[in-house]
Amino acid sequence: MPATSRFNIKVDKGLSLSWPVIWVVASGGANTIDPGTPCQKVDIDAATPTGAAIPMVDGDGDLGAAEGSFAGIAKNRSNDTASAAGTVQIWMPLPGMLYRARALTVAAADTQTEINVLTGKRVVFDLTSDLWTVDTAAADALVNCVVIVGGNPLTSEILFVYSAKGNFWDTSTANTS
């Protein structure tokens, strides 16, 4: 079972334009997705697709070979069990939605100058223990989809958008399982 998200990733702007979509969560765990968890759609190209969404893991947020497409941020806790598939509501990741999460290293985003320097950098998510953060120290790369667009130095929070090339809306990038 994945670590709980403690509501660390939030939709900062654009929520009124989005809507929650119900996704399948495969059996095998219990309440595997918590509110605020970034989720991915997997097995789209599998021989027998399940339509399942799963939580992202540490280092996700790029176009990696073993990753699915970004499905959005979970609105509620999933109701899957060890023996039965369940569902979860995930906010539809519309282009232009603005998300907010703490920086992995607080000292990397505790001044406006540091945040200004980070703006435009493409990074990934970090999951340490049960805390979702933005890995501001990750190398900027074309395959990274967490794009920093600002922040709040008083809380060391990072504002970011998720690049359309990494979510399931985009058709220019193949979905992998």
Image (spheres, rainbow, N blue to C red):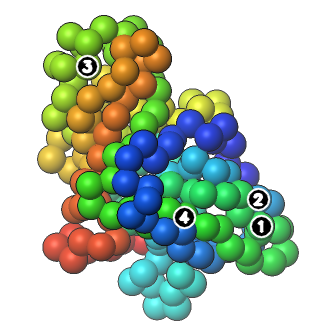
Check whether the beta carbons of the residues at disc 4 and disc 2 lie within 8 A of each other. no
Residue at the spot of label 1: 79
Q: Which numbered disc, 4 or 3, marks the residue that appears first in the sequence?
A: 4
The location of residue 118, given as percent across then percent down, is: 21, 24
Check whether the beta carbons of the residues at disc 4 and disc 3 lie within 8 A of each other. no
Q: Is residue 94 above or below residue 60?
A: below
**Residue appearing at x 76%, y 69% in the figure:** 80
Residue at the spot of label 2: 31
Task: From the image, state whether disc 1 or disc 3 is nearer to you.
Answer: 3
Q: Which numbered disc, 1 or 3, marks the residue that appears first in the sequence?
A: 1
Label 1 vs label 4: CA separation?
A: 13 Å
**Residue appearing at x 51%, y 41% in the figure:** 9
Q: Which numbered disc, 1 or 4, marks the residue that appears first in the sequence?
A: 1
Label 4 vs label 3: CA separation?
A: 28 Å
Query: Which secondary structure lies at badge 3?
Result: helix
Check whether the beta carbons of the residues at disc 1 and disc 2 lie within 8 A of each other. yes
State the image quarter where residue 112 is shown: top left
Q: Which mark is residue 115?
A: 3
Q: Is residue 16 above or below residue 108?
A: below
Residue at the spot of label 4: 90
Task: Quadrant for the C terminus, please.
Answer: bottom left
- Look at the image and tell me whether residue 61 can be seen: no
The local crowd at label 1, few if under 14, some if 14 to 19, many if 20 or more residues have their Cα within 10 Å, is many
